[in-house]
């Protein structure tokens, strides 16, 4: 099997080399890497050369919206739908283009942040927006670059840094639900070194999650990060960084005997996540070669409590070694072709603890490792045209190997119109929960699962006019998912649910539309709409809509600067159409499908500069006090008001 994968990659290398030598004489425009993305390729690449759908969220946008969690920012991104089980700190899932929540890879400064101890999902309820400088989002399968988890796309959270100055900034805010939000960050730069970091704290008593009762479910989050960069020479630089997230979150239980819905209960999860990174970069100014070596460590520890007593825990550690490099070449003075490669090793350990009973023993220690090899070609054979080809082999020691690939192209027809498209495959390794998880009276894992796989393609049109003041993007996407893992299969031997690979395919297709405009120097407007048709085959052989995937999602964001830019008003409107969810009936012991009503939520934020360095902020979320749910039975918060101060001081 491995020899077959290696043969596939060698054929791709031969084809790339043939293409390079046959197109060098046609080259008119060199490969320029400006407005770089660090996520869409094995090495940084210009955003204008990326054929996949891209969204970049800047620090300015984060400050305008004043939201506290990453998931709130993602509601405005085309193709994204968010499902949150209550208020701040409650479990949150994000789905892209109808894919599963654990098929989207999240990076923190390039470190893989999906939690193996939480079904392979990123824990969005832990991710605060403070001290984030930039968020890069690439939609569509990116497994050829990033491997497992990147079947539906990649989010890279890039922390604040300012290598040009010494500064300190801070935020202090209070408001509804007894919320206190505070943060401080800063940086100092010398001739060849830079150090920066931050500390954030959020505490909220929360709101009542259940439809009945009056118990509030709150959260407390402390996040600290630090990074040191050192330029050893003009060619070599080093970076060391770390982040610790410490969270406690209250939640409700499920009434499995009468209603089958959430009910007030004294339940709590205490979690800690640790991210560590060290990397060495080599990038000489007059040399076609560049590369990097990095070592990344991620650890998560989740402890569950019931009525103040410990009940269970899950823990995971991920150690990753990554070597990436490449070289550029081509006709003319400036090279117009680039070949990049990656060699990676990932070791993942999983631990589960709980009380053993007559139903089984949850205590276990599991692990697996994967060696990965990737190759990528980027070239510009003619002016305005960029194409890429990439392939990756993930060699697992515990289950089947996977090979993924992508072919993409972008062509600037003229200054106002670009056409782009891509086709490729994705993969998702089965999670520890799916293979070995154990939950008394409910679920037992299946160690014989194989990875999920997909084939997907998209085509897009980007148009800009009037000096780039107006922009429209239209995208059609289509993905076919094979060997999807179903985690709700009844096991007649144990009388519990288990996980199995499906024999039938699941289909996700739809349309994304985005409109951005600067109507004047004072007014900006952004609107997006996504139609998603996500279907699967049920037990009766009929195509049914997949749950928690609304067909229609839309957003509008408008910003208005006034009083010589001292003041700003920002309006955000999010609409989610009707969707379905599953309901486990305690009377019939069946999984039924129920509808969740459509809803529209409006948020309003305002700011006013008191001085050049100090700013007054205010925000009203859910302005019209909409009553709605994103997960069956879990109520989202009503209207909330927040006020605060933020400032930045250079020295």
Image: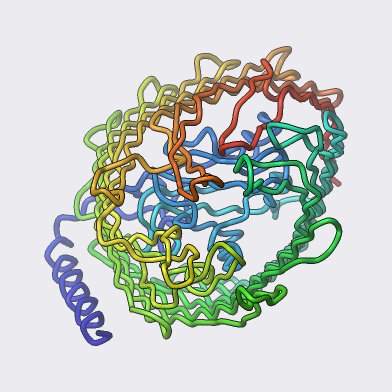
Residue 290 locus on image (x, y percent): 45, 72
**26 vs 582, nearest the viewer:** 582
How is the structure coloured here? rainbow
The answer to whether residue 50 of the structure is visible from this angle is: yes
Residue at image x 27%, y 31%? 417
**Is 222 above or below relative to 435?**
above
Residue at image x 44%, y 33%? 579
Q: On the picture, is 500 further left or further right than 251? A: left
**Is 259 above or below relative to 466?**
below
**13 vs 583, nearest the viewer:** 583
**29 vs 327, nearest the viewer:** 327
Residue 291 locus on image (x, y percent): 47, 73
**Is 135 above or below relative to 360?**
above
Q: On the picture, is 582 further left or further right than 191? A: left
Residue 144 picture quarter: bottom left
Residue 289 picture quarter: bottom left
The answer to whether residue 230 of the structure is visible from this angle is: no
**260 vs 26, nearest the viewer:** 260
Q: Quadrant of the N terminus?
A: bottom left
Residue 118 locus on image (x, y percent): 60, 62
Q: On the picture, is 630 further left or further right than 168? A: left
Residue at image x 25%, y 80%? 5
């Amino acid at each position: 099997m491995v020899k077959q994968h290696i043969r596939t990659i060698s054929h791709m290398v031969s084809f790339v080399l043939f293409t390079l030598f046959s197109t060098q004489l046609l080259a008119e425009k060199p490969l320029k890497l400006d407005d770089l993305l660090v996520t869409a390729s094995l090495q940084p690449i210009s955003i204008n050369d990326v054929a996949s759908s891209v969204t970049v969220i800047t620090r300015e946008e984060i400050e305008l919206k004043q939201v506290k969690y990453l998931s709130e920012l993602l509601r405005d991104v085309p193709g994204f739908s968010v499902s949150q089980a209550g208020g701040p700190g409650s479990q949150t899932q994000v789905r892209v283009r109808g894919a599963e929540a654990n098929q989207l890879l999240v990076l923190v400064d390039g470190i893989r942040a999906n939690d193996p101890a939480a079904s392979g999902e990123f824990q969005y309820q832990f991710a605060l927006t403070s001290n984030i400088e930039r968020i890069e989002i690439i939609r569509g399968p990116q497994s050829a670059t990033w491997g497992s988890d990147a079947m539906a796309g990649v989010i890279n959270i890039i922390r604040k840094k300012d290598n040009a100055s010494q500064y300190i900034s801070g935020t202090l805010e209070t408001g509804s639900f007894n919320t206190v939000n505070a943060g401080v960050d800063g940086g100092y730069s010398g001739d060849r070194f830079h150090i920066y970091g931050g500390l954030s704290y959020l505490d909220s008593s929360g709101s009542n999650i259940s439809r009945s009762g009056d118990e509030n479910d709150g959260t407390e989050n402390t996040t600290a990060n630090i990074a040191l960069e050192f330029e050893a020479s003009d060619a070599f630089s080093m970076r060391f960084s770390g982040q610790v997230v410490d969270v406690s979150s209250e939640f409700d239980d499920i009434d499995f005997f009468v209603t089958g819905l959430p009910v007030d209960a004294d339940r709590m999860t205490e979690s800690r996540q640790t991210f560590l990174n060290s990397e060495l970069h080599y990038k000489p100014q007059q040399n076609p070669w560049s590369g990097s070596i990095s070592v990344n460590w991620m650890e998560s520890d989740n402890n569950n409590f019931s009525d103040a007593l410990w009940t269970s825990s899950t823990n995971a550690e991920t150690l990753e070694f990554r070597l990436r490099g490449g070289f550029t070449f081509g006709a003319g003075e400036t090279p117009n072709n680039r070949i990049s490669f990656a060699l990676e090793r990932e070791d993942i350990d999983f631990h589960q603890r709980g009380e053993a009973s007559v139903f089984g023993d949850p205590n276990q220690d599991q692990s697996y490792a994967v060696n990965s090899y990737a190759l990528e070609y980027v070239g510009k054979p003619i002016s305005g045209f960029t194409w890429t080809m990439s392939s990756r082999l993930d060699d697992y020691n515990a289950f089947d190997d996977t090979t993924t690939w992508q072919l993409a192209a972008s062509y600037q027809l003229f200054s106002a119109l670009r056409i782009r498209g891509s086709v490729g495959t994705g993969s998702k390794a089965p999670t520890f929960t799916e293979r070995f998880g154990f939950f008394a009276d409910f679920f037992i894992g299946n160690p014989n699962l194989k990875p999920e796989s997909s084939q997907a393609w998209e085509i897009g049109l980007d148009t800009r006019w009037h000096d780039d003041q107006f922009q429209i993007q239209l995208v059609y996407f289509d993905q076919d998912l094979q060997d999807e893992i179903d985690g709700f299969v009844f096991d007649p031997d144990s009388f519990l649910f288990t996980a199995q690979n499906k024999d039938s395919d699941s289909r996700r297709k739809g349309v994304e539309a985005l409109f951005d405009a600067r109507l004047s120097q004072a007014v900006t407007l952004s609107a997006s709409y996504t139609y998603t048709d996500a279907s699967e085959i049920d037990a009766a052989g009929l195509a049914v809509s997949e749950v928690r995937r609304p067909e229609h999602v839309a957003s509008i964001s408008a910003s208005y600067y006034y009083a010589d830019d001292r003041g700003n008003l920002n309006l955000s409107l999010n609409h989610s159409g009707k969707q379905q969810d599953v309901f486990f009936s305690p009377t019939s012991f069946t999984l039924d499908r129920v509808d969740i009503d459509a809803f529209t939520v409006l948020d309003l934020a305002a700011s006013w500069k008191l001085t050049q360095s100090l700013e007054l902020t205010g925000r009203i979320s859910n302005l019209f006090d909409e009553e709605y749910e994103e997960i069956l039975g879990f109520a989202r918060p009503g209207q909330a008001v927040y006020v605060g101060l933020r400032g930045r001081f250079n020295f």
